[in-house]
Image (cartoon, rainbow, N blue to C red):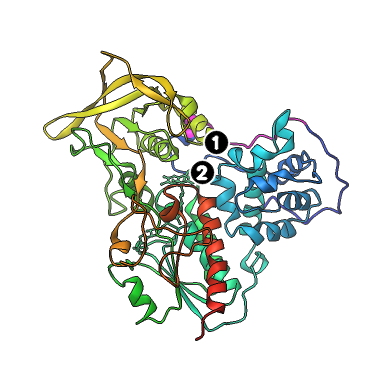
Amino acid sequence: MSHIEAPDPKPRHRPSRGPRTEMPARPAEERARDFDEVNLGYSEEQAIAEAERCLQCKNATCIEGCPVNIDIKSFIGHIINREYAEGVAVLKERNALPAVCGRVCPQEEQCEASCVLGKKGEPVAIGRLERWLGDFDLACDLEGRCKPEVGEDTGFKVAVVGSGPAGLACAGELRRFGHAVTVFESLHALGGVLTYGIPEFRLPKSIVQAEIEMLAIMGVEFVKDIVVGATYTVDELMTEQGYDAVFVGNGAGLPVFLGIPGENLNGVYSANEFLTRVNLMKGYEFPKADTPVWRGRKVAVIGGGNVAMDAARTAKRLGAEEVFLVYRRSEEEMPARREEVHHAREEGIEFKMLCSPSEVVGKDGWATGLVTTRMELGEPDDSGRRAPVCVMDSEFTIDCDTVIVAVGTRANPLLPKTTPDLELTSRGYIVANDHGATSKPGVFAGGDIVTGSATVILAMGAGKRSAQAIDRWLAGTSR
Ligand SMILES: Cc1cc2nc3c(=O)[nH]c(=O)nc-3n(C[C@H](O)[C@H](O)[C@H](O)COP(=O)(O)OP(=O)(O)OC[C@H]3O[C@@H](n4cnc5c(N)ncnc54)[C@H](O)[C@@H]3O)c2cc1C
């Protein structure tokens, strides 16, 4: 970041508890036409102003609100004191990917929800400050970047399956213990959902790549285009290839459909396929890129989570005239981050709340409409949210040429099928304890493949805890 100059002499902490410092963002009408990042990030001045809102509480409850217990008070204190490199080091102690998490973590439900300032006013914008420090680190040349220390070589070899946040966090931590690590990734690009799912306008891929580059510098070996469970089985890795332990962080990327009539019509996508074509295969640059993507004129996206929001905003950027977000509950129950909902609305996505799809209708093999029924909210269901109930005779059809189904994903059965002694839940997820240990000795697992679709930071936390457990397990084995 070129606007950051040499630190001033340490100023005294002058707390000011005014409103949160707004994050500058590009105007909606401009950004909805391209894939460049929406949020622009704080300037140094804005970061300091926001940091100075922090009360530096004696009992910093925000730390408990963070799933990986980052010492938030300390890194904000370093920003206040203009000790940016020290602030980065505090972040990296617990989180290998601060520039990523600063952008995509649901801080409003985690650390910021526990900020004392939030009780009466607005909490400190912890996520924005994390992003700012993460970007500060990435803007330094390689020499100047914070490089976690690598442990002395132990002679042990660990295989990591999958290069998403769980696999990356596990690999980084294993290197700190001095174990040799190879990450096997089935795709031709690294990063998991960070690369193929979350769009460029929310998380630039150059940031993900720069974070991965640091892991490579720490000695993590990456091997792409290898499907564990097909190219090699887990047992082959542990016997023929000589790995002493295996961490499985292969995510839960198998799309789920609604099972309604018409879902096999042309123009109907899973969000996973749609976003992969656009993000990973750069379909929006076709024919410059090899993979085409169908550009709908009127697009209905089914779902209410971050994935649905990403798909809707991506469709808009591909040139759709109208994009509808169809969700069977109300906006209050939508699991998507508030910021994403706000940005989607600003960009002209039309919200059709309390609408449940029942059929995709079509002509000559192509989708032409989505039949939906109006819903109202009844009693709370198992999730604690009020359950949607059909309104009699309220069926109507949304005129559209594209339907994107974003109602969730599940575990891919390929790896477990070839690893028969791995215990699974009834829904096909790997059973693992809090430290990632599975039913198979030497095999650990974490991230979405254990919890089902969750968040980046939870996947990273699981990867890191598993690395610590692997280290303890290896210490108890003889070579
Ligand atoms: C579109 C979208 C938007 C999201 N937005 C947010 C957000 O804003 N904030 C947030 O916190 N979370 C978000 N999430 C959720 C978050 O990205 C996931 O919870 C997280 O990525 C899970 O990490 P993981 O490492 O377990 O799995 P993944 O990220 O899925 O990575 C798994 C990796 O393993 C590879 N793999 C799979 N099978 C094999 C195999 N057999 N052999 C080798 N490699 C294999 C996959 O190709 C992939 O690269 C979003 C998810 C999606 C899909």
Q: Position of residue 100 (x, y in %)?
A: 55, 52
Magenta range is 18-30
Name the magenta segment's main secondary structure: loop
- Answer whether residue 197 is magenta in the image: no
Q: Is residue 35 left or right of residue 405?
A: right
Q: Is residue 163 above or below residue 455?
A: below
- The residue lying furthest to the top in this view is 393
Front one among 261 and 468? 468
Front one among 405 and 296? 405
Disc ID at residue 37: 2
Q: Are marks 2 and 1 in contact (CB under 8 Å)?
A: yes
Q: Is residue 99 above or below residue 179?
A: above
How would you rate the neighbour count of disc 1 (Cα within 10 Å): few for under 14, some for 14-19, many for 20 or more? Answer: few
Q: Amino acid at mark 2?
A: Glu
Q: Is residue 414 above or below residue 399?
A: below
Measure the C-alpha gap from mark 2 to mark 1: 8 Å
Q: Amino acid at mark 1?
A: Arg
Report whether residue 367 is seen: yes
Q: Position of residue 461 (x, y in %)?
A: 56, 56
Q: Disc 1 marks which residue? A: 26
